Image (cartoon, grey):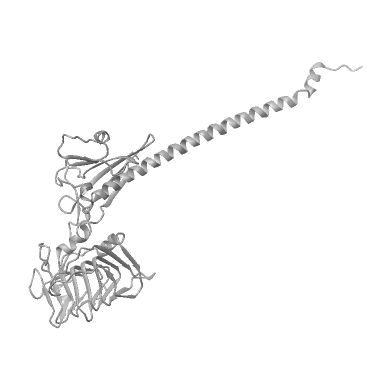
């Protein structure tokens, strides 16, 4: 009879293996389940924290926008934020509760400090506004210092630059943003008509007047060109009066303005946008200026519109032609060439990246300034055209514009 080795019998026995395997599988499932639960819980916490952080960020953004809105010159007087000390580095304005404003530096005993409650209560933010300064502590301005039409930070001219810090809070999460904002300076207009190409002024009833007719500002030349003054010619007996002459006020060798950059800076603010290639528009109305006693006198208007024409055809800019008694008040911005025919009146500034043709029959009056940046095609002004320089017609177009962001950053990044 064969003997069975007890050790071998034990090793070869399969009794209880199913139970052991089941226990091992259960253990693995428990571990996997626990891991999945912990991962899901962590993900949910991260997701919740992200949502809270995002809401705090949007709250901070809302605070910045309230500051921008309430600093507009035409904002409701009782809620407007006014800079009462534009040349003092100690001036500050706060939006928020007193306790939260104090945490940002508000001192009710400081006469240079002012505070106001937010216009809403749904979002939790506190805002601090102050003058931006350079590294030497000089107040910074946003303005055109070199006459090229583009604004830059400087310490002498333009509008104050404000440093705005907005702190948003939501359910324990906090985010802060910092931005530089500024009111929009007037468009640089060195004369009643600025050109960069050979120009002809023609007709016996054409007047280009650089003497400031309505703003009490500085008289300008009638025509300013980056070329030699001799490139501006006359046919017939037009009058070009201004600071340099009562009959032929033309200044050559002027600073080359970056007209395309000016056009680009304004098209994003347009109230009316037109994408038209080599098109004629008739009887357009964006406001009706009230004419003066004669066409050589300034008009007036209380409307401020920004009108933008994009004439790009996929290869190059083309033109837009306005006829049939078109009129408007504000800033007319044209990417391309502009042709004006028949009756035409405008109060404000006309910005053209290309050439301008201002001719044909009818009565025409532009009160403000015309700026044409084209250097290839010749400019032509004639046919009873009147361009009347007016500093207030120019400044009126920017005084109520929303404050522009010059820089923006997320604090703590």
Q: Position of residue 26 (x, y in %)?
A: 66, 28
Q: 391 above or below 68?
A: below
Q: What is the quadrant of residue 305 in the picture?
A: bottom left
Q: Give the x, y percent position of residue 365.
A: 18, 73
The answer to whether any part of residue 324 appears in the image is yes
Q: In which image quadrant can residue 308 be found?
A: bottom left
Location of the N terminus (image quadrant):
top right
Q: Nearer the viewer, residue 92 or 196?
A: 92
Judge from the rendering whether residue 16 lies leftward or rightward of residue 236; answer left or right: right
Residue furthest to the bottom in view is: 236
Is residue 225 something that shows in the picture? no
Q: Where in the figure is residue 105, as x and y percent of width and height?
A: 23, 35
Q: At x 14% / y 38%, what residue is drawn?
A: 111
State the residue in front, 327 or 391.
Answer: 327
The answer to whether residue 388 is above or below residue 270 is below
Quadrant (top left, top right, bottom left, bottom right) of the C terminus: top left
Residue 255 in which image quadrant: bottom left
Asked whether 202 or 283 is in front, the reply is: 283
């Amino acid at each position: 009879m064969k003997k069975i080795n007890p050790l071998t019998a034990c090793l070869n026995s399969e009794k209880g293996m199913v139970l052991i395997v089941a226990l091992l599988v259960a253990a693995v499932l428990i571990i996997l389940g626990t891991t999945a639960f912990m991962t899901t819980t962590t993900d949910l916490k991260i997701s919740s924290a992200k949502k809270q952080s995002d809401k705090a960020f949007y709250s901070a953004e809302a605070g910045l926008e309230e500051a921008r809105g309430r600093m507009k010159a035409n904002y409701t007087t009782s809620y407007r934020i006014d800079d009462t000390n534009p040349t003092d580095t100690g001036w500050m304005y706060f939006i928020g509760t007193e306790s939260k404003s104090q945490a940002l530096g508000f001192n009710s005993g400081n006469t240079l400090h002012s505070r106001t409650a937010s216009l809403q209560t749904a979002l939790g933010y506190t805002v601090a506004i102050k003058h931006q300064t350079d590294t030497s502590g000089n107040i910074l301005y946003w303005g055109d210092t070199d006459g090229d039409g583009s604004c830059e930070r400087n310490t002498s001219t333009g509008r104050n630059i404000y440093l705005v810090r907005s702190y948003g809070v939501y359910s324990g999460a906090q985010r802060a943003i910092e931005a530089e904002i500024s009111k929009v300076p007037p468009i640089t207009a060195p004369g009643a008509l600025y050109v960069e190409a050979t120009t002809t002024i023609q007709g016996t009833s054409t007047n280009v007047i650089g003497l400031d007719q309505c703003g009490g500002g500085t008289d300008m030349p009638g025509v300013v060109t980056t070329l030699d003054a001799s490139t501006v010619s006359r046919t017939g007996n037009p009058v070009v009066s201004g600071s340099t002459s009562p009959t032929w006020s033309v200044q050559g060798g002027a600073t080359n303005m970056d007209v395309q950059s000016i056009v680009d800076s304004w098209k994003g603010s347009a109230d009316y946008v037109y994408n038209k290639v080599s098109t004629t528009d008739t009887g357009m109305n964006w406001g009706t200026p009230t004419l003066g006693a004669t066409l050589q006198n300034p008009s007036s208007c209380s409307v401020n519109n920004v009108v933008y024409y994009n004439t790009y055809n996929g290869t190059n800019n083309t033109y837009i032609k306005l006829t049939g008694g078109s009129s408007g008040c504000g800033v007319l911005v044209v990417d391309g060439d502009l042709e004006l025919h028949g009756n035409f009146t405008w109060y404000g500034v006309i910005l053209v990246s290309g050439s301008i043709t201002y001719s044909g029959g009818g009565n025409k009056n532009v009160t403000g300034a015309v700026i044409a940046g084209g250097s290839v095609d010749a400019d032509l002004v004639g046919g009873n055209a009147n361009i009347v320089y007016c500093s207030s017609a120019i400044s009126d177009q920017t005084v109520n514009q929303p404050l522009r962001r010059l820089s923006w950053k997320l604090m703590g990044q």
